[in-house]
Image (cartoon, rainbow, N blue to C red):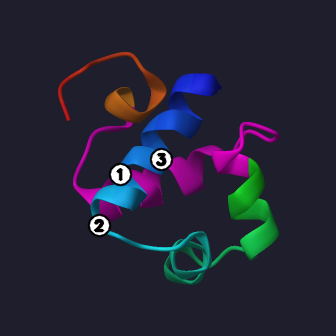
Amino acid sequence: MEILAQRMRELRKERKLSQEAMAKVLGVAWLSYQRYEGNERDPRAPFIADFARYFGVSTDYLLGLSNKR
């Protein structure tokens, strides 16, 4: 999902975090995280929920169903 990858990248960069740091925080391999952000692979629902919780946004926002964070 292009919008998911884009919003993940934007949120991470707003906090000035590296992809490696995000992978560690979320408990995934760096290569997996890189693929999620590069829109090469879709993350599973638990990952999306954890990501949303970490950044204090809704899953609807991450998935492009809402523009309200």
- Residue 61 sits in quarter: top left
- Which amino acid type is shown beneath numbered disc 1? Leu
What residue does disc 2 label?
15
Secondary structure of the residue carrying tag 3 is helix
Nearer to me, 58 or 24: 24
Q: Is residue 9 left or right of residue 60?
A: right
23 in relation to 59, above or below: below
- Label 1 to label 2, Cα distance in Å? 7 Å
What residue does disc 1 label?
11
Nearer to me, 26 or 45: 26
How many numbered tags mark residues here? 3
Observer-side mark, 3 or 2, equals 2
- Residue 68 sits in quarter: top left
Instruction: Identify which residue is drawn at 39% across, 58% down.
Output: 13
Q: Which residues are magenta?
A: 36-59
Residue 44 shown in magenta: yes
